[in-house]
Amino acid sequence: MNDIAETVKKNPHRNVFCADMSDSYSTGICLCEKCRDWDSPEGLPKTWYYPGTGPSVKGVSLSDRQVTFSNMLARKLKERFPDKDYKVMMRAYGYYRSAPLKAVPDDNVFIANTANCLFSLNSTDSSSNEKAVDQFDAWSKLTKNQIWRPNTGDHVHWQTGGPVDITGVGEIVRKMLAKDIYGFEINLIWYFWATQGPLYYLLGQLTWNPDRQVDEIMEDYYKAGFGPAAEDIKAYWTMLENNRREQGGGKSWAEAFSPEFFKEAYSLLDKAAVKTANDGNQYSDRIAFIRAGLDYLRLNTENQAYVKQILASKEPDPALKEKMRANWKQIEDISKKYPEALGRIGKNNLGYIHPEADHKGIEEKRLRKAKHAEKKKSLNEEMQGEEE
């Protein structure tokens, strides 16, 4: 409480204070009797890990524990600052995504629910095999103080700049915002404006007015943003959307974003550029910015193909690396010319297409991660079966 008193001295308008766990939510969980008393024995079975310090432990979901702790802090806030409307915020995240079975959030406890259903309402939480939207709805029965904060990951391509499903994501957002919630927050929307821009615009508009139709918002975007080239730009983004869905629906990336795709995509942008050639850069600069995103997508696709060849080859092929370096130089040039087009680029977030990355190591890590996730899923299913 003393920390909060000091905080509000510096920031007198602040009224929400986070009481959430850090990441690595499956490891290092306290086993003391008091903490375990806060858990519900009927909670979803979970495996608690202690890497390097001890064996794993069969535990349960941490939701009841987290809500109990948050309630305790929220009550202390009221006691210490009875004339203030101070709130405690926790997330519904990781091993506490599922709603608690016994604990109920107090009226000044807010839940930032990270239900990962931004890409699909049928998406499943890998740690529990529950549908993310069902988890969200279960919390809704306990509290109206929910903020939907989807933890995007890269399945919506916001961290690596791949094509987005504008209409599909927009419709999911409309459905989620129609629920009785307090607020909406999305992270990681400050990169790759040349490939994600229309979706960011749509999300901003829906946050302001979730009752508007997606098509209505996007029609306004194309007409206001591109004038005489509106129909060509609309056709371009629609084509990207459709191919993104094909890539997510079973086609490989290379099949969805084939040479034929790029030929047609560039043709649409060429038509748009002709129609705005004499506009004094009012629209033509925006079209050039979008073209930078298409150039990036092409170079990304080419480097993915080179990586596959590198992984398949028995001996190192310097020529493949040189082709990747040439493409990466073009990506760097795009980023310098249009600083907001791509944003953060490098081995950390684009390692798979970076020429100097350890591609075999990345692939081995991916396979290990997939194997670990499958093992974790089997353990959870086994533990649930024992409970039943």
Image (spheres, grey):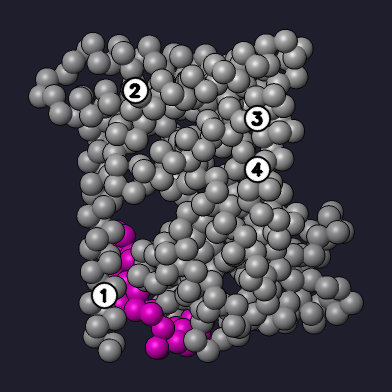
As measured in the structure, the alpha-carbon distance from the residue carrying label 1 to the one carrying label 2 is 43 Å
Q: Earlier in the sequence, mark 1 or mark 4?
A: 4
* Picture layout, residue 147 above or below residue 333: below
Residue projecting furthest to the right: 83
Q: Amino acid at mark 3?
A: Ala
Return the residue at label 1.
Answer: 381
Visible in this render: residue 34? no
Q: Earlier in the sequence, mark 3 or mark 4?
A: 4
Q: Amino acid at mark 1?
A: Glu
Mark 1 vs mark 2: give the one in front: 2
Look at 47% across and 35% down and name the residue there.
239
Look at 30% across and 11% down and name the residue there.
322
Return the residue at label 4.
Answer: 218
Look at 62% across and 27% down and name the residue there.
340
As measured in the structure, the alpha-carbon distance from the residue carrying label 4 to the one carrying label 2 is 27 Å
349 is within the stretch colored magenta: no
As measured in the structure, the alpha-carbon distance from the residue carrying label 1 to the one carrying label 4 is 43 Å
The magenta-colored residue range is 33-60
**Mark 3 in CB contact with mark 2 (< 8 angstroms):** no
Q: Amino acid at mark 2?
A: Pro
